[in-house]
Structure formats: C-alpha cells, structure tokens
Amino acid sequence: MSEKDRVYVAACGVCCSTCRLFVKGICLPCGSGLPKDRDVVEKKMAEQMKNLGKICSKLQCVVDKDIGYCMRDCKEFPCKIYKETMFPYSESFLNMYERRNK
Ligand code: SF4
Ligand code: SF4
C-alpha cells in the first residue's frame, strides 16, 4: 500500500484520513499504539510537544499499555481520562457506550 492510500485511525478512534485538516496538511495524522503506526505516532507526539507542550494522554496511554485502540482494546474505556477531558467524545456518547457495553 502506498503512503497515499494509507488510512490513519487514531488511538481514540478518530479517522484522520477523513478529516479536512489532515487533507489540507494543517494537522499531522494520528495513529494507534500498534507497531505499524510507530512512525506516525512519533511524529504526532513531536508535533504535540512543539505546539501544545504536552502529549495527548490517550495516545500516550495506548503506547504505554502496548495496545492499539482505546475502545477496541482497553477494558477500561471509557476511562477517567475520557471523562475528564470530554475529548473527542461527549458525555452522552460515553454514557451510551457504558449503557450498551454490558
Ligand atoms: S485525541 Fe489523542 S488519540 Fe485522538 S486523535 Fe487526538 S491526539 Fe490522537
Ligand atoms: S485507560 Fe483510557 S486512555 Fe488508556 S488505553 Fe484505556 S481507554 Fe485508552
């Protein structure tokens, strides 16, 4: 697969490939905690440190846990980090997820 065809899905589940900020080159794509995304995540973390002075807590967490995606791979989702930041999901989405994920 060429770089052009690569689909970027972030640890939080956002699909960067479908975002105009990515398409226009305004924002670097994000990735998962999987080895296949290591290059993307390293660049994303460097961009965040430069622009925000910190790394996304969700992205750092999947890397530390050595897992791919929060919703798919972590039994703690929606964890304290999501509930405290309310980003990128709303309270109603997180409540719906908890209600249905029994
Ligand atoms: S919230 Fe974190 S994991 Fe999701 S796209 Fe942004 S930087 Fe990546
Ligand atoms: S604890 Fe939260 S941020 Fe960390 S991997 Fe699990 S759902 Fe994602």
Image (spheres, rainbow, N blue to C red):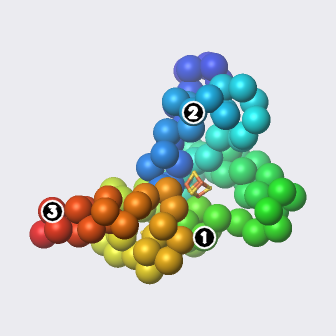
Residue 64 in sight: yes
Left or right position of 25 against 35: right
**Is disc 1 in contact with disc 3, using a CB cutoff of under 8 Å?**
no
Decide which of 77, 82 is in the foreground and name it: 82
Q: Which residue is mark 3?
A: 100
> Which comes sooner in the sequence, label 2 or label 1?
2
Q: For the residue labelled by badge 3, is the local secondary structure a helix, a strand or a loop? A: helix
When the figure is inspected, residue 35 is found, relative to residue 65, above or below; the finding is above
Decide which of 8, 53 is in the foreground and name it: 53
Mark 1 CB in 8 Å range of ligand 2?
yes
Residue 70, how many percent across, how many down? 42, 61
> Which comes sooner in the sequence, label 2 or label 3?
2
Q: For the residue labelled by badge 1, is the local secondary structure a helix, a strand or a loop? A: helix
Q: Amino acid at mark 2?
A: Cys
Residue at left offset 31%, top offset 71%: 75
Q: Which mark is residue 57?
A: 1
> Which comes sooner in the sequence, label 1 or label 3?
1
The outermost residue toward the right is 50
Measure the alpha-carbon separation of dots 2 and 3.
28 Å
